[in-house]
Image: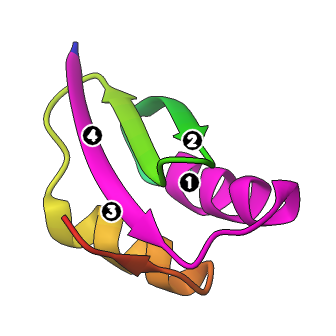
Amino acid sequence: MSTATYTVTGMTCGHCVSSVTEEVEQIAGVTGVDVDLPTGRVTVTSDAPIADGLIKDAVEEAGYKLTS
């Protein structure tokens, strides 16, 4: 089990949270996504470490920017 936390900018509402969650959940191996709207923190739990680039691509597909 692996957990990584990222910061995403541009999220302002529950729909934003849903969009990011849905995109990141589609990555193979991801078992959980927790988005904290006030802080912009996205915690991804997976079977094995996920490449940061895959997370970045998913967040950008949802329309937001990964800052860390």
- Does the stretch in magenta take in 52? no
| Quadrant position of residue 14 | bottom right
Q: Earlier in the sequence, mark 3 or mark 1?
A: 1
Q: Could you give the CA–CA distance between mark 4 and mark 3, rounded to whole angstroms?
A: 10 Å
Closer to viewer: mark 4 or mark 3: 4
- Helix, strand or loop at label 1? It is loop
**Residue shown at the point (42%, 65%) measured from the top left:** 8
Marks 2/3: CA–CA distance: 13 Å
Measure the alpha-carbon separation of dots 4 and 2: 10 Å
Q: Report the residue marked by disc 1.
A: 26
Residue type at the position of mark 3: Ile
Could you classify mark 2 by the number of other residues whose Cα lies within 10 Å: few (under 14), some (14-19), or many (20 or more)? many
Picture coordinates of residue 3 (x, y %)? 24, 25
Color encoding of the figure: rainbow
Q: Which residue is mark 3?
A: 55
> Crowding near pointer 1: few (<14 within 10 Å), some, many (20+)?
few
26 and 11: which is toward the camera: 11
Span shown in magenta: 2-25
Quadrant where the C terminus lies? bottom left
Earlier along the polypeptide chain: callout 4 or callout 1?
A: 4
Indicate the amino acid at tag 4: Thr
* Label 3 SS: helix
Circle 4 sits on which residue?
5
* Type of amino acid under label 1: Gln
